[in-house]
Image (spheres, helix red, strand yellow):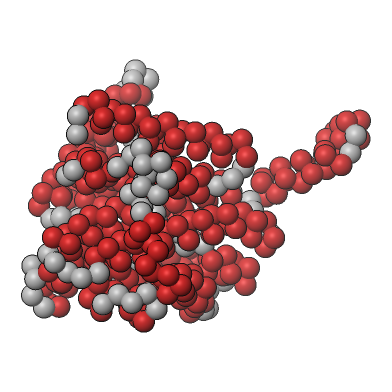
Amino acid sequence: MTPERLGLLWGITVFVGAGARLLAALTGLPGVVLLLLSGLFIGRSGLGLVEPLDLGQGLETIVGLLVSLVLFDGGLNLRLPGDTIKATVLRISLIRLVVSLAAGLLAAHWLAGLGWSVAAVYSAIILATGPTVVTPLVQQIRLAPPLGDVLEAEGLFLEPVGAVLALLLLELLVGDLHGWRELALGLFARLGGGVVIGAFAGWVLSEGLKRIRPDPSVGLRLQLTLGVLFLLYGICEWILPESGLPASVAAGFVVGRRPATEANQLDQLIRELAQLAITMLFPLLAADVSWSELSPLGWGGITCVLALMLIVRPCAVTVATIGLPLDVKQRLFLGWLAPRGIVTAAVASLFSIRLEQAGVLGAGRLQGLVFLTILMTVGIQGLTAQPLAKVLGLLSPQEQAHKSNESSQSKTSPDSASVLTDSG
């Protein structure tokens, strides 16, 4: 690809992503849904202006670095106040790890027609609810505690687990691993090694941030953070592939808990960069979706995804929350919202290429089913999340007051509205 064509690819991608964000701000529609649609519009399924595979091996590196930034931001803001939230996140994550893996395997094989081995890779890839989708939705909806904390923490915990497990299942499928014992050891090494290296890097970064004066340069804090984060990701991927994801979460978590690091000030800058990363990545990866990969799945693929959305997730959440002080409305919302995100799309694209190179049948169907899962979960759940939260009364008090204020002002005259304001 020529430099001019490469520049045009990024220019179109960022422009349509920013346009989707603007449209979301003007209309109130979920930004992640519009970002996904914008990628379909400029990619293979639309005008064909953007072809992500033109980036070659650089696509994996770019996606990895930007995703590490999003996960670091999630770790920086990870809050688990109270034993109830911790128990909820732990139980949902562990039960979904077992139930969703088994159910995804069966659904992908029986309903979507994937072979057993490829179906196992699919079930691991779509295991996690993507924090790149959940976090913007939670922020836009403004959920009342503790739902937002639970949903974000669940995604941050399962995203690295799903990605690492999918990689190991892929290596088992193509013959790079031999037996389940090597898979279990590889999972422990990558997750445990990533967390340890990430926690150490977070401690080093926090010590450096403590020694920077608070006044002179906020930009210096940001530069130091990005330098450590990207170096951390590169080292982890070099030593243990896919360990960069848990390392990024661990580093962010440590920095966010260390005193005297001005984490709040740093968080504002990292959050803006993370939003920019999502604005770039979602259209880019959605542009890789081809209708030719989706159409062969037919109603079997749609039924597979619907089964995961309407049966598997609600059942897993119901079992996980037994005995916890969550009411029926909170359990219903937790059982509904589980969109898949950027890491899922990136892993599917890269793994499909490796499967095709290894001569494994069903590689194209795997990528098609994963992207169908993303399209349906982001589209359906993204559009219904805020109305459902409003109907169930799960919006934060400030958001409910704001909406009721808007409603009352639209039904009263300016004079009566001012009287209500004064009396309040």
Query: In percent of the image, x 8 and y 75: which residue is there?
Result: 178
Q: Position of residue 379 (x, y in %)?
A: 51, 56
Q: Residue furthest top?
A: 216
Q: Is residue 312 visible?
A: yes
Query: In percent of the image, x 17 and y 69: which residue is there?
Result: 360
Query: In percent of the image, x 48 and y 61: which residue is there?
Result: 376
Q: Quadrant where the C terminus lies?
A: top right
Q: Position of residue 25 (x, y in %)?
A: 58, 36
Query: In percent of the image, x 70 and y 49: which residue is there?
Result: 400
Q: Position of residue 130 (x, y in %)?
A: 39, 56
User: Of residues 57 and 268, which is closer to you in this image?
Assistant: 57
Q: Is residue 222 above or below residue 280?
A: above
Which quadrant would residue 103 be assigned to in this image?
A: bottom left
Q: Is residue 398 above or below residue 86?
A: above
Q: How many marks?
A: 0
Q: Is residue 182 left or right of residue 314?
A: left
Q: Is residue 299 above or below residue 13?
A: below
Which quadrant would residue 223 be assigned to in this image?
A: top left
Q: Quadrant where the N terminus lies?
A: top left
Q: Is residue 318 left or right of residue 45?
A: right
User: Of residues 202 and 181, which is closer to you in this image?
Assistant: 181
User: Of residues 259 and 243, which is closer to you in this image?
Assistant: 243
User: Of residues 397 and 50, which is closer to you in this image?
Assistant: 50
Q: Position of residue 163 (x, y in %)?
A: 27, 60
Q: Is residue 75 visible?
A: no
Q: Is residue 359 left or right of residue 78?
A: left
